[in-house]
Amino acid sequence: MNAIEQIINWMPALVRASGWTLALTVTSVFAALAISIFLALGKISHKPYLKYPSSAYVFFFRGTPLLMQLFFIYYALPNLVPAFTIKSRFMAAFIAFSLNVAAYLAEIIRAAIESIDKGQMEASRTLGLSYVQAMRLVIIPQAYRRMIPPICNEFIMVLKDTSLVSIIAVTDLTFQTKMIASNKASQLVYIPSMIIYLIMTGFFTIIFNKLEKKFAIYD
Amino acid sequence: MKRKIAILIAVLMVATLTLASCSGGGGGGEEKAQITSPADFAGRSVAVQTATTAADAINEMNEEGDGSIEVHEYEKVIQCFDDLLLDRVEAVYVDNVVASYYTRDSDEYEVTWTNEEGEPMGICIAKGNTELAAAVEAGIDTLYFTGEMEALANKEFGTNLTEGVRDVKELPEIPTGFATVTPGKLTVGSEVGYPPMEYTTDDGQTYIGFDIEFAKKLGELFGLEVEFVNTAWDGIFAGLERGQYDIIASSVSITPERQEKYILTKPYVSNALCIVTKSAIGSEA
């Protein structure tokens, strides 16, 4: 009984903290989506000035640990270039996550576009569409559906990876959980926290499943 | 419809980010008076290490007051000082042993207030392990008697922080017959990263510092080999409960809450909370 009372007492703080987890996940995934579309098209492009910078970007952000990127943006960068001092911890986390997630999403989008049969592009060009028109009207709409499951996967990964930001003191769910665990010296708090993570990931899994069904009509 | 959703998302994102950058802003803006006591904390941003007595004190102030102190809680104490240098916080609330280390060789920091009420440190032992506690207590007394503690303090702090902590008139006898986690070894838990108490050489390979040297001397007295376990501070007491190490020698301030859950020796080195800010000279330069 006592344990349940304790958990109820922690709930407001945990729920408030999961608000930051959600806010960080959603904002950074959408920002990353915007960046990644350009990166993916850049990687597909045959023009070297688009292809190589995009590839280098993906190579860098996919090839170094997210935690280190977070530390780099929060601590190292301001020491190297004082003009890049980011005051807000949330903003620093948002930037690190957007840049990192964009690299992964770019690969997902590239793979989805490249999985569309070559004949589609050839047929569109034969019908007189330009490269951009063919991409926008024919290829990308077909690629949508193939993107959704891996993007859902990535989204859920990001939601859990946001626990890393507790290390720069963003008061997310993990930070709050560790605070309660160390201040009140009760390890029980991990249980409600994990359940909250499960509820959040479960919610987004359902949303993505719905989206997938909706886009299935194009197939 | 799609365009509306896109606009909605964009607006929400901008709103969240603006909110976040305002709430996390701190520092900056108009010139404010120097923080010279905990009473000045209200409405200001302060960095502390998580699960320390400083963190407990400041969170308590927030709970009892109007909650306007913007607290940045970090796992490592160096993160607090990094934030101070980068103007993300206006003050660091920390043990003065650490403050003295950072201010000794640098004019960028300044200690503006030190608590008159001391908060001396003790060695922490698991509840019920009274044999080992008695041995550690006698070991500290021995090191005080021989003057080794004083020499160590002078070397690490530049001042004698052991002065008046213990008054040992005669050489005590160290009891034997206590058990350790690993037989033949004294296993010591420490959060290495808290200079000058426990930190590493520049290459990060060798542990050095006051507690490290102290624990080695204690091991010599016991005739045991000393092994250090580097642990995160916020899990250090849990590790002791799980029996990962025999003692914690890691700048543990003696508090009633801790005394309730663990055995703490009598003080072995003095300490007090203090406030560190960026020095006026340092920020102009």
Image (cartoon, helix red, strand yellow):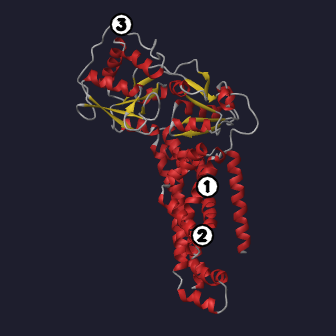
> Residue B149 location, x and y as percent?
39, 17
Marks 1 and 3 sit apart, C-alpha to C-alpha, by 61 Å
Q: Secondary structure at mark 1?
A: helix
Q: Secondary structure at mark 2?
A: helix
Is residue A167 among what the camera can see?
A: yes
Label 3 marks which chain's residue? Answer: B
What is the tally of numbered marks visible in this picture?
A: 3
Q: Nearer the viewer, residue A146 or A23?
A: A146
> For mark 2, what is the residue?
A49
Marks 2 and 3 sit apart, C-alpha to C-alpha, by 80 Å
Vertical order, B238 against B144 (above or below): below
Q: Nearer the viewer, residue B129 or A156?
A: A156
> Residue A117 location, x and y as percent?
53, 86
Mark 3 neighbour class, 10 Å CA radius: few under 14, some 14 to 19, many 20 or more: few
Q: Do discs 1 and 3 share a chain? A: no
> For mark 1, what is the residue?
A95
Vertical order, A142 against B152 (above or below): below
* Image quadrant where residue B186 sits: top left
